[in-house]
């Protein structure tokens, strides 16, 4: 599977936001994260890095 863990870097600290993320959709100035089970989170952030081999998505606020 190709799920990812999403982290947000805020004030220089990396915090985990969501696991098993399968889609990231832009919604205006926010991102809609959806996990493998259909759970969703809408977060005001921008993509800093997507690491497919490491299964990580790094966002910044």
Image (tube, grey):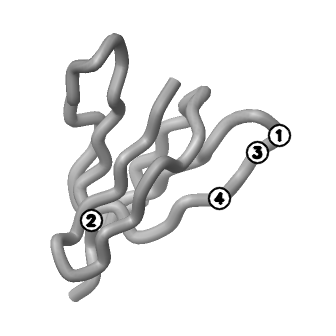
Kindly identify which residue carries mark 2. Answer: 4
Image quarter for residue 56?
Answer: bottom left
Q: Tag 4: Cα neighbours inside 10 Å, few (<14), some, or many (≥20)?
A: few
Task: State the residue at coordinates (50%, 67%).
Answer: 23
Sequence-wise, the earlier of marks 4 and 2 is 2
Give 25 or 12, whichever is nearer the viewer.
12
Left or right of 28 in this view: 41: left
> In the rendered structure, are the residues bearing label 4 and label 3 in contact, judged by CB atoms less than 8 Å apart?
yes
Kindly identify which residue carries mark 4. Answer: 25
Give 54 or 40, whichever is nearer the viewer.
54
Kindly identify which residue carries mark 3. Answer: 27
Left or right of 16 in this view: 27: right
Image quadrant containing the N terminus = bottom left
Q: Secondary structure at mark 1?
A: loop
Distance from Cα at disc 2 to Cα at disc 3: 19 Å
Sequence-wise, the earlier of marks 2 and 1 is 2
Q: Tag 2: Cα neighbours inside 10 Å, few (<14), some, or many (≥20)?
A: many
Distance from Cα at disc 3 to Cα at disc 1: 4 Å
Residue 3 circle label: none
Sequence-wise, the earlier of marks 2 and 3 is 2
Residue that extends furthest to the right in the rendered view of this protein: 28
Q: Secondary structure at mark 3?
A: strand
Kindly identify which residue carries mark 1. Answer: 28
Q: Position of residue 4 (x, y in %)?
A: 27, 65
Task: State the residue at coordinates (76%, 45%).
Answer: 27
Left or right of 49 in this view: 36: left
Q: Position of residue 29 (x, y in %)?
A: 76, 34
Distance from Cα at disc 4 to Cα at disc 2: 14 Å
> In the rendered structure, are the residues bearing label 3 and label 1 in contact, judged by CB atoms less than 8 Å apart?
yes
């Amino acid at each position: 599977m190709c799920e990812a863990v999403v982290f947000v870097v805020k004030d220089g600290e990396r915090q985990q936001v969501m696991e098993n993320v399968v889609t990231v959709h832009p919604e205006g100035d926010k991102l809609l994260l959806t996990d493998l089970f259909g759970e969703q989170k809408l977060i005001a952030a921008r993509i800093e890095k997507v690491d497919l081999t490491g299964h990580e998505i790094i966002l910044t606020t």
